Amino acid sequence: MGDTGVLEILKKALLLEKRGKAFYEKVANNTENNGVKELFTTMAKEEESHIQIISDQFKSYRDSNTITFEKSEEAHQSHFASMVLNESIKKEISAAEFEAAAIAAAMAMEKNAIALYLGRAKETTDPQEKELYSWLAKWEQSHLDFLVSIDKELCEQIWQDNQFWPF
């Protein structure tokens, strides 16, 4: 892809992460439910971490044509891993259509980020760049997995409440 290709991918990544952060902050600010607010506030913090990492790599590549990424498992697990899908959060989300819709939108955003990162990780021959995007994809996958589990719980609850089960 060449030098400008790396910068273009990093710009796209920054845009995705900034949009995600703005979306998650908006949902957190517009909900009355404390558990949902905590969930989306945590996700916004995660996106802020991604923005910082990608910004640092953008500056490094722009200035020296090198990716200087060093993965940090601590940062990877700092906020999101502590979130627990408890009954209170599930009830708050299922009782509020806006929050349930936000979960679906968040899943789509995470899938887009994963696709971008995995695509670039596969394309690049630079080991540091490959490690950066593989690590970011793994981080986004953890977000997606959590959101999918929430969505699954919500669907099952709705099916149960509306007697959609065939048995």
Image (tube, rainbow, N blue to C red):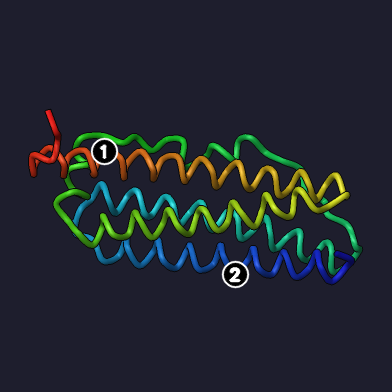
Q: In which quarter of the image is the C terminus?
A: top left
User: Along the horizontal axis of the image, is 128 left or right of 144?
Assistant: right
Percent coordinates x, y for residue 34 in the rendering: 23, 50
Percent coordinates x, y for residue 130 in the rendering: 78, 47
Percent coordinates x, y for residue 33 in the rendering: 20, 53
Q: In which quarter of the image is residue 149?
A: top left
Q: Which amino acid does label 1 sit on?
A: Glu
User: Along the horizontal axis of the image, is 130 left or right of 154?
Assistant: right
Q: In the image, is residue 86 above or below residue 97?
A: above
Give me the residue at 26% from left, 66% from top.
30
Give me the residue at 88% from left, 67% from top.
3
Q: Quadrant of residue 14?
A: bottom right
Q: In which quarter of the image is the N terminus?
A: bottom right
Task: Please name the residue that numbered disc 2 is placed on.
Answer: 15
Q: What residue type is labelled 2?
A: Leu
Mark 1: secondary structure: helix
Mark 2: secondary structure: helix
Q: In the image, is residue 152 above or below residue 113?
A: above
Task: Please name the residue that numbered disc 1 is placed on.
Answer: 153
Give me the residue at 72% from left, 65% from top.
9
What separation in Å lies between label 1 and label 2 (alpha carbons)? 30 Å
